[in-house]
Image (cartoon, grey):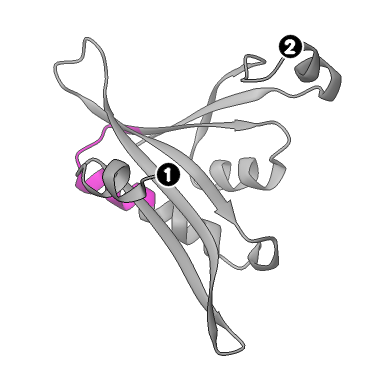
Amino acid sequence: MQDITRYYIKNPDNCFWVAEAEVNGRPLVVGMVAVEGKILPNSDGKKVGELFRMNVSSKCRHTGVGSRLGQTVVDFCKERGFSKIGLHTSSLQKAAIFLYYKMGFKLVQTHTDCKCPWWITMLIRINILQMEKVI
């Protein structure tokens, strides 16, 4: 996030989108999403996209912003010739999980391996969901 232009914009297989809406005559950021293109190991150059940083303002949820951002990612990945889109989210993100299922993502794996001490994972009973959509 420190250098969006260098990381997301200068690489043609990566992209970052920001959704804006006009509220009281002023533009406000209401959502964002990013995708990173990756080459699958041992696949003769087959590419996949990984969805990152999907975020919709709490004031704009259930208005279609997340669906439109998600569809933007799907369209971009199809244009780039990716075979699928993957993502990771936590079990606490109920609305996001519902959105991903609605978009056609499937659960691939659930685990507790996150970037926090193990005892925090156990205390808050969090799981990491790995999801994919074949395109």
Q: Nearer the viewer, mark 2 or mark 1?
A: 1
Residue at image point 67% right, 15% down: 112
Residue 8 location, quadrant: top left
Instruction: Tell me the distance, in whole angstroms, between the alpha carbons under discs 2 and 1.
Output: 28 Å
Tell whether 34 sits left or right of 102: left
Q: Is residue 95 above or below residue 134?
A: below
Secondary structure at badge 2 equals: helix
Given residues 115 and 80, the one toward you in this image is 115
Q: Is residue 75 above or below residue 110?
A: below
Q: Which mark is residue 2?
A: 1
Q: In the rendered image, which quarter contains the C terminus? A: top left
Name, please, the residue furthest toward the right. Answer: 123
Residue at image point 14% right, 16% down: 44
Q: Is residue 25 above or below residue 70?
A: below
Circle 1 crowding by C-alpha within 10 Å: few under 14, some 14–19, many from 20: few
User: Which x, y percent locates residue 130?
Assistant: 54, 25
User: Which x, y percent locates residue 61?
Assistant: 65, 62
Is 62 contained in the magenta span?
A: no
Q: Which residue is mark 2?
A: 118
Is 75 contained in the magenta span?
A: yes
Q: Is residue 54 above or below residue 117?
A: below
Stretch in magenta:
73-84
Q: In the rendered image, which quarter contains the N terminus? A: top left
Circle 2 crowding by C-alpha within 10 Å: few under 14, some 14–19, many from 20: few
Residue type indicated by callout 1: Gln
Given residues 62 and 11, the one toward you in this image is 11
Secondary structure at badge 1 equals: loop
Residue at image point 45% right, 57% down: 69
